[in-house]
Amino acid sequence: MDYAPDNLLITGGAGFIGANFVRHWLSRPGTGPVVVLDALTYAGNQANLRGLEHDSRYSFVRGDICDEALVSRLMAEHRIDTIVHFAAESHVDRSILGPDDFIRTNVVGTHALLKAAKKIWLDEKAVRAHRFHHVSTDEVYGSLGLSDPAFHELTPYAPNSPYSASKAASDHLVRAYRETYGLHTTLTNCSNNYGPYQFPEKLLPLLIINILSGKPLPVYGDGLQIRDWLHVADHCRAIELVLTRGMVGEVYNIGGNCETTNMQIVRAICRQMDELLQADANLLKSYPQSPAARGKPAETLITHVRDRPGHDRRYAIDFSKASRELGYAPSFDLAAGLRSTIEWYLLNTAWWQPLLGRDYAQWVQSNYSAR
């Protein structure tokens, strides 16, 4: 039976995937109110939601998902019937350097949300129907060999980083609240996302911005780690399908059908950046430090750096269950997705330039030192 969400609470809605989902959801005709809850840590940015303040269905609350009392109050005041939980610390490198924040946000924070949901929805029976959707990652499954079959929903968990371990723990909590208390939950495990509004420490925006400024393009180890790349717009459509058509208690893997090596991604970005810059004299003038402005290919900036500890070799997603049961299929092929992403960053310098402060530059330098 299909589910019709009325009033949504979207955690982490000022982050990369969360903000794209907020925009996607509010673009649908006839949708109800959306409350965005975000702590606005380093990767949370209200500029990701700029323009939505004029939509009467949208409201923003700055707050911590670990604050159970705040979450309970918001749920009661806004008669929330659906939580879409994006809020998470998500950068593996940061989890290696400082795992405590990942345990607090991803485990303790998720548990606080689940407790508030149980209180409002099950104990107080404040709404007729409800849904708690938890957004997770393919990294909980560990690493694949080159000939291994892709991750499916019954693949055993084997997380290899503090980040993936914290997400695995939160996944288990969501399952436990379904099995123990009867909370109506769904869960998605997605592959690597890319697209607009992604914080510049992540691979694709880092490459784009570094090419524009003529800085090295860091590649971990030999660059042959394999990932499945998922455009964030396809991910948002998939979550909508899970919310409205997904079965309570089910897990759905969401992939982009774009399995490729990191080195292939880097070279593809370089080629497309060269083409776009060389075709536009104004861009060449705006970015005089770029290789194209100096008559060189962007690939000359590729720099191999020390590999990350415990770096998983390959991820791959089998999304046949989501395809079969929900009608999901990615709409972006990799070339088109990369081109649209590059063009977005070229058109939105006012969004990303303020994010490149001294603290960010120092962090990148300390984590991508040449081997």
Image: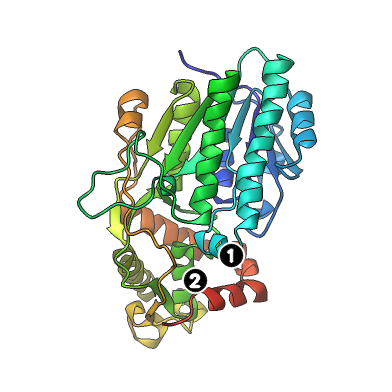
State how far apart marks 1 and 2 are (Cα): 9 Å
**Percent position of residue 237, x then y:** 45, 35
Element at label 1: helix
**CB under 8 Å between callouts 1 and 2?**
yes
Q: Which residue is mark 1?
A: 352
Position of the C terminus, as image quadrant, is bottom left
Position of the N terminus, as image quadrant, is top left
Give the residue type that dot 2 points to.
Answer: Ile
At horizontal 68% and vertical 39% (from top left) the residue drawn is 36
At horizontal 29% and vertical 45% (from top left) the residue drawn is 257
Going by the image, does 69 lie left or right of 239?
right
**Percent position of residue 173, x then y:** 57, 34
At horizontal 79% and vertical 26% (from top left) the residue drawn is 77
| Quarter where residue 178 is shown | top right
What color scheme is it? Answer: rainbow
293 relative to 68, above or below: below
Q: Residues within 10 Å of mark 2 (few under 14, many from 20)?
A: many
Going by the image, does 273 lie left or right of 10?
left
Residue furthest to the bottom in view is 294
Give the residue type that dot 1 points to.
Answer: Trp
Going by the image, does 16 lie left or right of 146?
right
Between residue 331 and residue 104, name the one nearer to us. 104
**Percent position of residue 82, x then y:** 61, 26
Q: Residues within 10 Å of mark 1 (few under 14, many from 20)?
A: some
Q: Which mark is residue 209?
A: 2
61 relative to 282, above or below: above
Element at label 2: helix
Q: Earlier in the sequence, mark 1 or mark 2?
A: 2
**Percent position of residue 99, x then y:** 60, 58
Numbered label tally: 2
Q: Is residue 49 visible?
A: no
